[in-house]
Amino acid sequence: MTLIVILLAGQTARFRGAANTAKGTPRYWDVQVSPIFGAHGQISQLLSISRDITEELEAAERERGGLRRLDAANWFRPSLRYRRVGARRL
């Protein structure tokens, strides 16, 4: 469903996306948009709450990259590898 369809149905929508700040700095955002209803039950306004999640996403990417490097390095060190036997690690 598109954002407009969700809002016209009276529901709150949430999405993540990239957009530049007013100064042109690229950032990643978690955005929640909710309809606000007027006196006659019609949507009269939209409330949008945006949260900058750039640092969170960058930290997660650094962690994934670090884990990939660690896995690759440990592959060549048999003492750090393990086999699964049932539910036990050897």
Image (cartoon, rainbow, N blue to C red):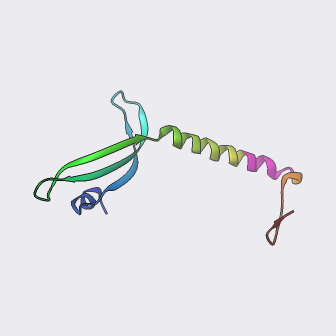
- Which image quadrant is residue 7 in? bottom left
Side of 71 where 89 appears, left or right: right
Looking at the rendering, the stretch of residues picked out in magenta corresponds to 70-77
Secondary structure predominantly adopted by residues drawn in magenta: helix
Q: Residue furthest front?
A: 39
Looking at the rendered image, the quarter that the C terminus falls into is bottom right
Is 62 situated above or below 25? below
Q: Residue at x 14, y 59 (%)?
A: 41
Look at 52% across and 43% down and name the residue there. 57
Quadrant in which the N terminus is drawn = bottom left
Report the front residue among 73 and 46.
Answer: 46
Q: How many marks?
A: 0
Q: Where residue 9 sits in the image (x, y, percent)?
A: 23, 63
Q: From the viewer's perspective, tell me whether residue 6 is left or right of residue 90.
A: left
Query: Residue 2 location, x and y as percent?
Result: 29, 59
Residue 29 location, x and y as percent? 41, 43
Say if 12 sits above or below 55 in the image: below
Find the residue positioned furthest to the left.
Answer: 40
Judging depth in this view, the residue of 10 and 63 nearest the camera is 10
Give x and y (percent) for residue 67: 69, 47
Question: Which residue sits furthest top?
Answer: 23
Magenta span has 5?
A: no
Q: Which residue is at a point 37% across and 40% down the rendered structure image?
A: 19
Outermost residue on the bottom side: it is: 86
Residue in the image at 33% along x and 56% along y: 13
